[in-house]
Every structure is written in structure tokens, then in C-alpha cells.
């Protein structure tokens, strides 16, 4: 069913697009580039099949692969082509970001699609890596089709962020309600023993950082993700998410956040927590397409191996 959004929610969701908040907080965000996507790229993302530009180069009409008998045998259907100009821009942008990027669309990164990547993460070293991850992701498809409910679709952007080796333990989800930081929790729900002694430091850094964001961000309630590097002297902005049900509250829940009347709280995973519900691998429910869920395990593994193999072959060509 298509979600019906209020005008206020719609405005807030639009403000939370990477390309919007990045303009305000460029100096506090790791280096990134935001590319406007042509309509044909959206069409390619939504089309059946996964026909990537050949050899990293795209033929004029993209027909050389999809017209061949081999492709129909392999179950590919005709997919529209990625415009050559856009493909070149993506390649050029990856080069300008030191050759390794973490991609996302307006709001979502393809965290649920890393199973298809040979390195099992979101690191992309060429344009085809980017296309393949984004196209395989249900989270990114949500951006394309459902992000604005009945007011959609959005003006699509592709965000390429310069890759850096992030310590997942030092990523925090931070809840700002009516201009005030009310709660912070770990983003990666595993137990890290070194975090507890850093409580005060983490709180101080994130509280100060939140005031900078509150000053400039147009909405007074929002959820931001921050990364504190091991020097523990600052925070980097990773994302701003809507103060809406669609944002995962991790160690909090929406009911308590909406009616919050307590002092600030920093929630960390305790030693015993990680042996209970937390500490599992995230997004595993979204790792493979729904069609594959009922397949016998051996068939799924075989299929994934084949996909990886064919992907590597394409890279070598
Ligand atoms: N430049 C980067 N280099 C390497 N990894 C990155 C980079 N930027 C983000 N990441 C990793 O990617 C993860 C997901 O990114 P991001 O928070 O933008 O995704 P998202 O789709 O908005 O997630 P959510 O749905 O939880 O809001 C981050 O938690 C971080 O671990
Ligand atoms: Mg986010």
C-alpha cells in the first residue's frame, strides 16, 4: 500500500536527503559527491535483469548483451541501458575520490546487498560495483519507489562517498528532539568493552556536535549518525535520518523517544546483552531476494557462487 505522508513529513524526508543536508554540513562530513541521475538510470535500476555496461564501457544502446541468445538462456530480460555520459561521470567521480567509494541513493545505502560483493562490504572500486550493489538492494529500491509515499518518486541522486575504514564500534545513532540531544546509542549492536570507560567523552563530543547540526538543520527533531575517530577529538557526520517510524531506533523505541521527559541517555551494549538478542548479523533478513528464501540451501550457495564468478569474469573482461 502507498503511504500517505503529511506535507510536514514530506518536507522533513526531503531535508534528510544526503544531497540536501550535505550542502549544510560539508565540513563535518567525510568527502562525498552527489550526482543527479538521468531518468534512464532510474529505468535501468527498476528493469528486470542485471546487464552491466560491457567491460566497464557501455555500448551506445546497451543491446549487444541483451540481444544475444546467451542472455535469454541465462534468464536475463532486456534491461534499459545506463546512459554513457552518466557512466563516464560515475567512473570519473570514483577516480576523483581516490578510487574507492561507498555508494548510496538519496537516503539509503545498499547494506542489504553486500552478499553479492566479492569483498562482502560496500566498497566499490569501479562503476559496475556501484550499479550492481545498488540494483541488488531492497533498501535502495525503497528510495526509488516508496520513499515519498504517494508524493513520489523523488529526484534521484547517486551519492559516492570516499571510502575509509570505519570502526563500526565507534558509530553512534543520535536522537535530537525539539532541538535537544536526548539519546545516543551504538549503531553496531555488539559488545565492545572499551566503550564504557569512554562514556563521558562520547557524550561530550556528540552533545557539542549536535548543537552545530541543530543550528543549521531546518527541522528541530531528527536522527543523526556520527562517527568518532580513534583520536576521540571530534565527530564526523555520516547521515541524517527522518524523525519517523521508518528510521530504526536500535536500542531505543519510538514510543519512549516521542514522549521523552528524562535526562540525556547514552545506551551501550553490556557484556550480557550481546549473548542475548543483540550481536546478531544485521540485514540478514534482507541479504537475499525473497524468491531465494525457499530454495534449498545448496542451490542458494551454488547460485551465489555463480553470480560472484560471473561478476568477477565481467570485471576481468
Ligand atoms: N565513506 C564511507 N566509507 C566506508 N564506509 C562507510 C562510509 N560511509 C558510510 N559507511 C558505512 O556504511 C554504513 C551505512 O551508511 P549509511 O548510514 O549512510 O546507510 P543508511 O542506508 O542511511 O542506513 P540506515 O538505514 O541505518 O539509516 C555506515 O554505518 C558506515 O558503517
Ligand atoms: Mg540513514
Image (spheres, rainbow, N blue to C red):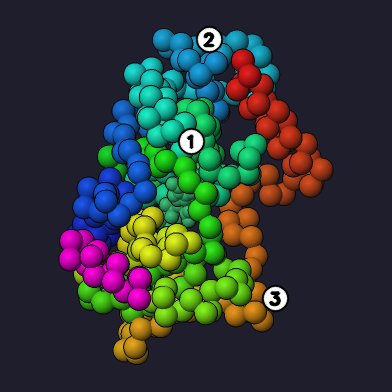
Which badge, 2 or 1, comes first in the chain's sequence? 2
Residue 135 seen anywhere in this rendered image of the structure: no
Tally of numbered tags: 3
The range drawn in magenta is 204-218
Place of residue 62 in the rendered image (x, y in percent of width and height, measured from the top left): 47, 14
Residue beneath disc 2: 64
The foreground one among 222 and 140 is: 222
Q: Nearer the viewer, mark 1 or mark 3?
A: 1
Place of residue 213 in the rendered image (x, y in percent of width and height, measured from the top left): 24, 64
Residue beneath disc 3: 275
Which badge, 3 or 2, comes first in the chain's sequence? 2
Residue beneath disc 1: 100
The foreground one among 161 and 61 is: 161
Whether the residues at callouts 3 and 2 have beta carbons within 8 Å, the answer is no
Crowding at dot 2, Cα within 10 Å, few <14 / some 14-19 / many 20+, comes out as few
> Where's the N terminus, which quadrant?
bottom left
Name the secondary structure under disc 1. loop
Left or right: 303 with respect to 143? right
The quadrant where ligand 2 appears is bottom left
Left or right: 54 with respect to 6? right
Mark 1 to mark 3: distance in Å? 35 Å
Q: Residue at x 22, y 74 (%)?
A: 179
Residue 206, magenta (yes or no): yes
Q: Residue at x 48, y 76 (%)?
A: 198
Amino acid at each position: 500500500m502507498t503511504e500517505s505522508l503529511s506535507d510536514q513529513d514530506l518536507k522533513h524526508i526531503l531535508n534528510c536527503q544526503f544531497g540536501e543536508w550535505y550542502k549544510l554540513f560539508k565540513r563535518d562530513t567525510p568527502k562525498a559527491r552527489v550526482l543527479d541521475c538521468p531518468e534512464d538510470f532510474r529505468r535501468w535500476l527498476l528493469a528486470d535483469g542485471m546487464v552491466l555496461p560491457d567491460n566497464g564501457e557501455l555500448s551506445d544502446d546497451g543491446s549487444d548483451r541483451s540481444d544475444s541468445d546467451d542472455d535469454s538462456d541465462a534468464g536475463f530480460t532486456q534491461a534499459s541501458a545506463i546512459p554513457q555520459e552518466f557512466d563516464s561521470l560515475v567512473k570519473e567521480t570514483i577516480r576523483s575520490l581516490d578510487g574507492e567509494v561507498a555508494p548510496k541513493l538519496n537516503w539509503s545505502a545498499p547494506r542489504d546487498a553486500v552478499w553479492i560483493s566479492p569483498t562482502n562490504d560496500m566498497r566499490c572500486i569501479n562503476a559496475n560495483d556501484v550499479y550492481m550493489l545498488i540494483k541488488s538492494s531492497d533498501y535502495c529500491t525503497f528510495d526509488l519507489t516508496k520513499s515519498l509515499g504517494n508524493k513520489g518518486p523523488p529526484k534521484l541522486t547517486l551519492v559516492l562517498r570516499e571510502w575509509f575504514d570505519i570502526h563500526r564500534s565507534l558509530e553512534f545513532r543520535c536522537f535530537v528532539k525539539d532541538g535537544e540531544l536526548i539519546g545516543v546509542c551504538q549503531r553496531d549492536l555488539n559488545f565492545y568493552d572499551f566503550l564504557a570507560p569512554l562514556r563521558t567523552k562520547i557524550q561530550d563530543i556528540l552533545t557539542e556536535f549536535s548543537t552545530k547540526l541543530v543550528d543549521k538543520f531546518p527541522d528541530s527533531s531528527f536522527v543523526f549518525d556520527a562517527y568518532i575517530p580513534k583520536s576521540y577529538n571530534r565527530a564526523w557526520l555520516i547521515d541524517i535520518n527522518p524523525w519517523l517510524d521508518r528510521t530504526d531506533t536500535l536500542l531505543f523505541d519510538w514510543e519512549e523517544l516521542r514522549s521523552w521527559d528524562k535526562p540525556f541517555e547514552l545506551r551501550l551494549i553490556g557484556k550480557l546483552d550481546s549473548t542475548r538478542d543483540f550481536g546478531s548479523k544485521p540485514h540478514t533478513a534482507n541479504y537475499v531476494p525473497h524468491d531465494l528464501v525457499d530454495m534449498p540451501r545448496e542451490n542458494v550457495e551454488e547460485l551465489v557462487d555463480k553470480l560472484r564468478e560471473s561478476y568477477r569474469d565481467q570485471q576481468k573482461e
